[in-house]
């Protein structure tokens, strides 16, 4: 693979949670738009298949098995992007889990998992990318929050708390970078077709989510927003995008 890219319009984009859902669809859309994608997720066989699909269509992709709860693994993923392509232009902190349940169920393991993936995973992505971006004089973080980062719903208290945290972290980072060329975008999807609901162990919450998902957006609706934010001129920061189904009450 090449050690750098010569087209200034081509971005090297790292994506976590890239093995399915929004991450997978975003990788395909970005590669089709001519960007280089570096894919991270826990399911390596899915990453390999996705990279093969992108390459078969003429795109450029690399991948590394990555659990975002491990700072070392996130560092390795971002390091792979810089090592193979010479730059890290965009980091999409997309990995997330959503095991909804009522607070009284006291599912502490699931609460801790959401904090580890949804909050600490984003922080690890920022920590891995920020020094590189500062050194190269440009960069872009895209952090995936949720409509659950704008309002709180029953069974979703802890999940919503993690997504509020993503927004707070992102906005703080944006304000700290006003003297540089690092952009920060928050993407807040409404209900989207994905495997997130399968992580819900509580039967009542899982049934309610399946009902809610009847109006779910396709992941490509979010992927188009990612491409839009990335391809704006360097002096334009698309700070936040909320995308929900037209029929969604939330």
Image (cartoon, grey):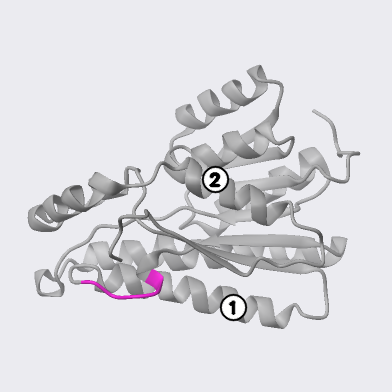
Q: Is residue 179 above or below residue 75?
A: below
| Residue shown at 40% from the left, 71% from the top | 149
- Return the mark for residue 223: 2
Location of residue 151 in the rendering, given as x and y in whole percent from the top left corner: 33, 75
> From the viewer's perspective, is 215 left or right of 135?
left
Residue 196 colored in magenta in the image: no
Span of residues in magenta:
149-153
- Return the mark for residue 217: none
Which is more toward the observer, 103 or 151? 151
Q: Quadrant of residue 62?
A: top right
Q: Quadrant of residue 108?
A: bottom left
- Please say whether residue 17 is visible from this viewpoint: no
| Residue shown at 78% from the left, 38% from the top | 84
Location of residue 96 in the rendering, given as x and y in whole percent from the top left corner: 41, 55
Quadrant (top left/top right/bottom left/bottom right) for the C terminus? bottom left
Residue at the limit of the structure toward the right, as seen here:
6
Residue wearing tag 1: 171
Q: Secondary structure at mark 1?
A: helix
Which is more toward the observer, 100 or 217? 217
Task: Specify few, some or many for label 1: CA neighbours under 10 Å numbering under 14, 14-19, or 20 or more.
Answer: some
Location of residue 32 in the rendering, given as x and y in whole percent from the top left corner: 66, 31
Residue 151 colored in magenta in the image: yes
């Amino acid at each position: 693979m090449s050690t750098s890219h010569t087209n200034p319009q081509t971005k090297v984009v790292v994506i976590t949670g890239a093995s399915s859902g929004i991450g997978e669809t975003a990788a395909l859309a970005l590669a089709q738009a001519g960007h280089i994608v570096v894919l991270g997720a826990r399911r390596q066989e899915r990453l390999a298949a996705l990279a093969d699909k992108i390459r078969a269509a003429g795109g450029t992709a690399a991948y590394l098995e990555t659990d975002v709860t491990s700072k070392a693994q996130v560092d390795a993923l971002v390091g792979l992007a810089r090592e193979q392509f010479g730059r890290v232009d965009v980091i999409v902190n997309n990995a997330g889990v959503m095991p909804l349940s009522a607070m009284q169920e006291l599912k502490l393991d699931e609460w801790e998992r959401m904090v580890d993936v949804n909050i600490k995973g984003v922080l690890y992505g920022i920590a891995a990318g920020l020094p590189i971006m500062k050194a190269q004089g440009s960069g872009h973080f895209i952090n995936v929050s949720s409509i659950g980062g704008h309002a709180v719903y029953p069974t979703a208290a802890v999940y919503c708390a993690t997504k509020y945290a993503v927004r707070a972290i992102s906005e703080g980072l944006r304000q700290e970078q006003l003297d540089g060329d690092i952009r920060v975008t928050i993407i807040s999807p409404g209900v989207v077709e994905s495997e997130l609901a399968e992580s819900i162990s509580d039967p009542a919450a899982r049934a309610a989510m399946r009902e809610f998902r009847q109006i779910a957006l396709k992941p490509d609706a979010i992927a188009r927003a990612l491409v839009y934010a990335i391809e704006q001129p360097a002096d334009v920061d698309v700070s936040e995008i909320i995308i929900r189904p037209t029929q969604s009450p939330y």
